[in-house]
Image (cartoon, rainbow, N blue to C red):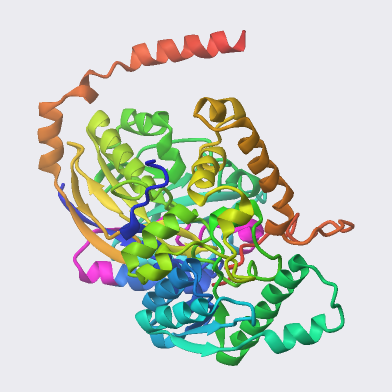
Amino acid sequence: MDFTAQLAQIKPKLGCVDDNLALIEERIGQARTAGADLVVFPELAMTGYFLKDLVPEVARRLDSPEIARLVELSRGISIAVGFVEETSDYRFFNSALYLEDGAIKHLHRKVYLPTYGLFDEQRYLARGERFRAFDCKFGRMGILICEDMWHLSSSYILAMDGAATLLCLSSSPGRGVEGETLGSATAWQKLTATTALFLNCRVLYCNRVGYEDGINFWGGSEYIAPSGESVVRAGLLEEDSVNALVEEGALRRERIFSPMLRDENLCVTMQELRRIERERRL
Amino acid sequence: MAGLAANTELLRKILVGFVRDEVHKVGVRKAVLGLSGGIDSALVAFIAAEALGAENVHAICMPYKTSNPESEAHARLVAQACGVDFSLVPITPMVDAYFGMFPDADNMRRGNKMARERMTILFDHSAHYSALVLGTSNKTELLLGYGTLFGDMASALNPIGDLYKTQIWQLSEAMGVPSEVIEKQPSADLWAGQTDEEELGFSYRQVDELLYRMVDLRLTREELIGAGFGPEFIDTIYKKVQNSHFKRRLPVIAKVSNRTIDRDFRYSRDWGK
């Protein structure tokens, strides 16, 4: 079915869960007023990104009042939001929730925690161990958190699992000022467009803005149609929100024109991956 | 080369946003900076004026008696061009009073003392105006260690510390820094006629090409030689970067506890902002 998704390109405050929750609530209200069916927030929208030793302080359990509040708000609009999750065995995950009709529909824990260059996630966070598509009112979806998407297998698995819509929640730092556009923006735009094109699926990419210790987050949230075409894109380096009308017809047409996904041979892929796995063990 | 040719429009947006965001988030509206008459501080004044509004930026020119009079004239020109508030605080009385006790001090000690004298004035005005001190050291001089620790290297925020001198020239032109300031020879201005490039022994353009490949692209020594850089030049610059690294770090703390500041007590500076 057709639906309208709002990409809420916010600027969270580092380590201030209450302030960020208030901001998220405000943007949920605005998205509802703007007629959106789904509002997507960035990675770690509840906490900010360069948390370091703050991780245990800002982490919330799934049964915390803050999460309960968001679940409650999902009675009026579906919500995808990033936060730090604390589990009962005291592990901390960079997680994202999909909330619908007052219930947690899906939880994704970031699998690929970047620990290179300016990133240091694996020092503070535990690794997620699965990619799973899930059903919601708007069809079958999959969630990726930022770096997850830079691993082709992540999107591939979700598409094979039936996801027609990939939600990518991001906190991408801007760098590279040599070209026509920001280096990281160019790289991401290539990635999201190519992923949509290869897998005949839509991508809803939501990136944050603001600065943390001099590092900028560049925004540029966008909706990419299954053709790989960018339909709508939010502003660069500024708080923004854009509505994306996600049309079922566009997905159907694209899958008729370019039936790569239909022809994808999962058996061959699995056979070869198993062989590679076997050979690597030798 | 492509790597050093910056997209000035994008750079301007990022740096103006940086100053605005990082100043406002600590709950103040203003910034203060030292205006030497040179290009680096001129560019920072232009960025700050655009970010905070010219009326919220206080530029202080702090000449010593041996400073080139042209420097003060250029500082005034820059302040006028970008509209920031300008004041003059000569450092001759303080510096001379001090070296009256140490008359044999060499030029290096005198230069460092002047830089630190200026720092104390900027931080005093920071409290006076409720303003953050903006740094004006560029990436080239930070990497080479061509600056005074706790002197001109001290600041609360530095918008241009990731820009090579070559990029400073490009952005200054794009932002309308007066051409007299862009075109003149860079100088620490410790005495009339001094120029950076003469003192360093190479040109900024030469060293920027090398540093960009060495630091940003992480080319190996062999690759740098292959790219046409002389082995002696490569080694000299590598040593300069290595030997000045202490200037780019916080003081070393002897570890005795489980949580030592900056070692295993790690928080972003923007913690709670």
Q: Which residues are magenta?
A: A30-57
Residue sitting nearer the eye, B215 or A184: B215
Residue sitting nearer the eye, B239 or A116: B239
In the depicted structure, whether residue A217 falls above or below residue A261: below
In the depicted structure, whether residue B243 falls above or below residue B169: above
Picture residue at 86% right of the left edge, 56% below the top = B255
In the depicted structure, whether residue A138 falls above or below residue A194: below
In the depicted structure, whether residue A60 falls above or below residue A154: below
Q: Is residue B180 visible?
A: yes
* Residue A139: quarter of image: top left
Say left or right for B74 vs A142.
right
* Residue B168: quarter of image: bottom left
Where is residue B49? Give x, y as percent: 40, 78
Where is residue A24? Give x, y as percent: 39, 68
Magenta region includes residue B13:
no
Magenta region includes residue A35:
yes
